[in-house]
Amino acid sequence: MKKRLLSGLLAAAMAATLLMGCGSKSAEVAGAQRETNGKVGVAMPTKDLQRWNQDGANMEEQLKAAGYEVDLQYASNDIATQVSQIENMISSGAQVLVIASIDGDSLGTVLAQAKEAGIKVIAYDRLIMNSDAVSYYATFDNYMVGTKQGEYIKEQLDLDNAAGPFNIEIFTGDPGDNNARFFYGGAIDVLKPYIESGKLVVQSGQVEFDNVATANWSTENAQSRMDAIISANYANGTKLDAVLCSNDSTALGVTNSLEANYTGEWPIITGQDCDVANVKNMIAGKQSMSIFKDTRTLAAKTVEMVDAIMKGTEAPVNDTKTYDNGTGVIPSFLCEPVFADVNNYKELLIDSGYYKEDDLK
């Protein structure tokens, strides 16, 4: 009898110990679950351009530091791939989607799914068009980007005082990227009066957006078009004074073409993103300037937006008038861009820690 009693007591003690162990393990799991503030899907268009790699890395780092689980995907500039990736983010429990779209008009159906699931969407740097699922837009002031590029050409050529005429060619970005129209519009608003007065001459005659757009922001496409422009207009020794390029990948294509085909005095060339290859070209005197958009700043602001959404509060915005995606104006936060050139690139890019000096050698 005593043996049976002792045996029963030991069994009860062991069971209690096991239960305590399970309870402790459950507490550990619950604690681990509490450490994650939620899941965020981040959809980037491609790894082919340096800037998107930086955007994705900065976003992932800062979201994780804020306690979020991050699903970061790159779509290789393929719309169907990006749609599939977003569908997977929705089905796997993402509570917020941050999307840099490949084509701003191609996500309506999948974002309708997100809206039905109660998932908030932040359009990142590229406005997503014709979808009422977009809650916020985080970007740089894209019209100002173009304005700064146009003003740089205006100042460098001293258009208000010099006699001219000066020859200029124009390269902007992908027609499916809403930003390209803002970049182009900002620059053309500065330069158009000089084109109309004849002080700036576009020898190719290609001025309208549809004629100067570059599919996929492709370096190869820009280079091919510049090859044709030089052959038709500058092979006879006509001087090219400036090339307005909306970003660095198009500027790189223009530079490659000039190096291969142009023998005259080197023109002013603008750009955007401060990609490594282009900063090296700036240092070498082959590109005049590039708009610097510190993606760490944009990522930080986007994380603030995510945080506000997760907490059920209003996200920070500073523009409620400019960006209408076809379903209404999207509340936006616009970060201010600055331009880098050979005179200030060290301060902006190296001293700030964006690049190491060795990166630019």
Image (spheres, grey):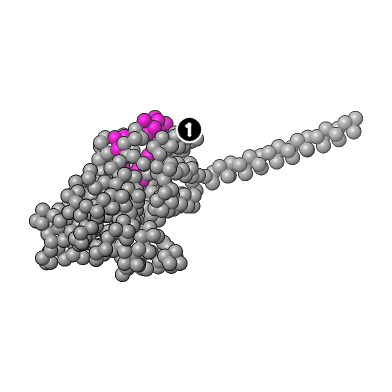
Tell me the quarter of the picture where residue 149 sits: bottom left
Density class for disc 1 (Cα within 10 Å; few <14, some 14-19, many ≥20) is few
Task: Tell me: 239 left or right of 196.
Answer: right
Residue in the picture at 37% in, 44% down = 100
Task: Tell me: 32 left or right of 50.
Answer: right
Q: Foreground: 300 or 200?
A: 200
- Quadrant where the C terminus is found in the figure: bottom left
- As for residue 311 lying within the magenta part, the answer is no
Q: Is residue 278 above or below residue 34?
A: below
Task: Tell me: 310 left or right of 156.
Answer: right
Q: Foreground: 102 or 285?
A: 285
Q: Is residue 140 above or below residue 79?
A: below
Residue in the picture at 37% in, 52% down = 298
Task: Give how far across and how far down residue 170 sits, in percent.
Answer: 23, 52
Task: Give how far across and how far down residue 269 sits, in percent.
Answer: 27, 60
Query: Badge 1 is on which residue?
Result: 91
Magenta range: 109-131
In the current view of this chain or complex, which residue is farthest to the front? 236
